[in-house]
């Protein structure tokens, strides 16, 4: 088996051994949606301030993006910081396997967890609250992948800058909460004032929520939202790769 | 036949030459020690050999290859243990060995390696649950898992208790017995004296000496010291009159008589003739540590007190 496959398998096992990452990365979006739907009165009924939509419909995409952001901005950067701080990347440089393959393995593991978390969350609201299965599945997948690419690129950049575990955590959190705000975790985008929504559109998570929401309910995502995510993925990803230090 | 040839190696950080014109070679099958104070350039030198650092000048041949240009082949044939390098806390010993073994074209049997290093019972133990000595032995195992021709070990035993250190020493002797050339960077003179065929003493980026352990000791003279409490007073002049005696010092009630050649016999004969008994007699001889301190001066002394 190739070294990248072995690294991916090993990093996958290590992810499974971290109960906190496992909870917040894998099951939290589904748990959050179930909790909101069952515990908040009227959450699964048409709401006047959402023009007749249900809160559970609006929060589906938000929870998915929240899960992605947790993986990309909270889980990933400290791992990269740890691997640099512990000299694991440097150690790999003395072997025939380039440490870039360890980063690839981490991204593959995080993407796989994100796909599973998304599938569980979608299934949870479809089964429990009669939310439709994503109505434009292809656009849904495209939106999800672009969202993942932009978030992981930012996580990689933080990992490139963080020298240690703790600085990875600190920078990650400092980016995580403002991004969640613009994603509409506290004020859903539909009820954001116009100015705020425009700013939100320019953030990768804001665009991600909009594109996933559109494709979930049968619309074609706005090109602008897709482009914002693609630009973040490419530009930030490029800077991250340029700035990445192995030690 | 040399497996490593270093000529006029220079590595500069800022405006300091951390490695300043170092040349040496390591022969196949030898254990080559590198000792020196902190910041002497030991780690920079070995990391240049490993290809982790690009020298600013000089030439490096490792197994006839260029460590920068022939990275892939060098990494296949040279195993390294790095200073202050760890593994993932939750990675198990067996998983780490299997993973690293999969990186190489012709890996060693990693279970057999764990056996030889006394880690076979730890195969399912997480890295974070290993003791310091076990972690270092695992680092040795990982350095050897690719069946390297050269193993480079950087401060392998720093931070280990004396017992763990001795057990790692036995492992290093086994490695050499298996035909692997070893480059050993160390703080401990006892370790260098016990293991190394030749030792390079570096100080401030330059070579202070390259020699066998006994050759280094001989350089500072084969001086002997007798330390004792005489049962009856004895005049210094009577002792210094002996041609073998170089110096007499007093330390409380004790006399310290130093000299060369047959000084021990000459002094004890004189004492016997005067019917003076040498109580609490201790005879000391220069060792590698004295040679090291003589070669590196105060910088070496600071180092030793930190290391111990």
Image (spheres, helix red, strand yellow):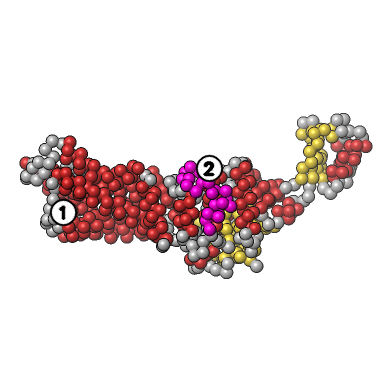
Q: Circle 1 sits on which residue?
A: A134
Q: Position of residue B302 (x, y in %)?
A: 62, 43
Q: Position of residue B127 (x, y in %)?
A: 47, 46
Question: Can residue A141 be seen at all in this image of the molecule?
Answer: yes
Residue B304 versus residue B71: which sits nearer the camera?
Answer: B71
Please provide the residue range marked out in magenta.
B109-131
Q: Report which quarter residue A112 is drawn in.
A: bottom left
Q: On the picture, is B127 further left or further right than A65?
A: right
Magenta stretch: includes residue A181 = no
Chain of residue at mark 2:
B
Q: Which residue is painted at 41% across and 62% down in the image?
A: A1
Q: On the picture, is A155 further left or further right than B226?
A: left
The residue carrying pointer 2 sits among few (fewer than 14), some (14 to 19) or many (20 or more) residues within 10 Å by Cα, namely few
Count of labels shown?
A: 2
Cα gap from disc 2 to disc 1, whole angstroms: 52 Å
Q: Which residue is painted at 41% across and 58% down in the image?
A: A6
The residue carrying pointer 1 sits among few (fewer than 14), some (14 to 19) or many (20 or more) residues within 10 Å by Cα, namely some
Q: Circle 2 sits on which residue?
A: B131
Question: Can residue A174 be seen at all in this image of the molecule?
Answer: no
């Amino acid at each position: 088996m190739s070294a990248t496959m072995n690294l991916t398998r090993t990093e996958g096992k290590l992810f499974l051994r971290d109960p906190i990452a496992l909870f917040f990365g894998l099951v939290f979006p589904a748990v959050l949606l179930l909790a909101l739907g069952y515990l908040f009165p009227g959450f699964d009924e048409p709401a006047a301030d959402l023009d007749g939509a249900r809160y559970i419909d609006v929060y589906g995409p938000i929870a998915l993006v929240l899960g992605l952001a947790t993986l990309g901005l909270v889980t990933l950067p400290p791992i990269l910081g740890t691997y640099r701080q512990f000299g694991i990347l440097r150690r790999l440089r003395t072997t025939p396997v380039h440490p870039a393959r360890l980063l690839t393995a981490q991204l593959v593991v995080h993407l796989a967890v994100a796909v599973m978390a998304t599938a569980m969350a979608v299934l949870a609201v479809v089964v429990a609250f009669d939310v439709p299965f994503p109505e434009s599945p292809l656009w849904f997948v495209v939106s999800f992948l672009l969202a993942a690419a932009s978030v992981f690129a930012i996580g990689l950049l933080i990992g490139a800058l963080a020298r240690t575990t703790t600085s990875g955590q600190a920078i990650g959190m400092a980016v995580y909460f403002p991004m969640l705000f613009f994603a509409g975790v506290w004020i859903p985008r539909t009820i954001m004032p116009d100015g705020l929504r425009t700013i939100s559109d320019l953030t990768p998570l804001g665009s991600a929520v909009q594109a996933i929401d559109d494709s979930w309910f049968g619309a074609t995502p706005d090109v602008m939202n897709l482009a914002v995510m693609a630009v973040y993925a490419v530009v930030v990803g490029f800077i991250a790769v340029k700035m990445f230090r192995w030690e | 036949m040399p497996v490593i040839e270093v000529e006029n190696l220079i590595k500069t950080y800022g405006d300091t030459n951390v490695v300043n014109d170092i040349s040496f070679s390591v022969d196949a099958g030898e254990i080559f020690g590198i000792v020196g104070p902190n910041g002497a350039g030991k780690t920079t030198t070995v990391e240049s050999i490993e290809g982790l650092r690009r020298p600013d000048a000089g030439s490096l041949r490792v197994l006839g290859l260029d460590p920068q240009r022939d990275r892939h082949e060098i990494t296949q044939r040279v195993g390294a243990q790095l200073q202050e390098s760890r593994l993932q806390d939750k990675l198990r010993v067996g998983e780490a060995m299997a993973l690293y073994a999969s990186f190489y074209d012709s890996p060693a049997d990693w279970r057999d390696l764990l056996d030889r290093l006394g880690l076979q019972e730890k195969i399912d133990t997480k890295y974070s649950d290993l003791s310091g000595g076990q972690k270092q032995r695992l680092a040795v195992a990982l350095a050897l898992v690719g069946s390297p021709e050269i193993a480079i070990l950087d401060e392998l035993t720093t931070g280990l208790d004396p017992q763990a250190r001795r057990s790692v020493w036995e492992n290093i002797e086994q490695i050499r017995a298996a035909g692997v050339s070893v480059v050993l960077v160390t703080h401990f003179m006892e370790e260098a004296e016990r293991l190394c065929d030749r030792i390079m003493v570096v100080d401030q980026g330059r070579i202070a000496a390259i020699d066998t352990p006994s050759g280094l000791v001989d350089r500072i003279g084969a001086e002997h010291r007798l330390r004792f409490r005489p049962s009856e007073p004895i005049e210094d002049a009577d002792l210094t009159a002996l041609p073998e005696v170089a110096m007499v010092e007093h330390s409380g009630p004790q006399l310290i008589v130093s000299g060369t050649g047959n000084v021990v016999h000459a002094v004890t004969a004189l004492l016997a003739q005067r019917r003076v008994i040498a109580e609490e007699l201790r005879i000391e001889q220069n060792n590698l540590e004295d040679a090291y301190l003589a070669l590196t001066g105060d910088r070496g002394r600071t180092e030793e007190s930190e290391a111990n």
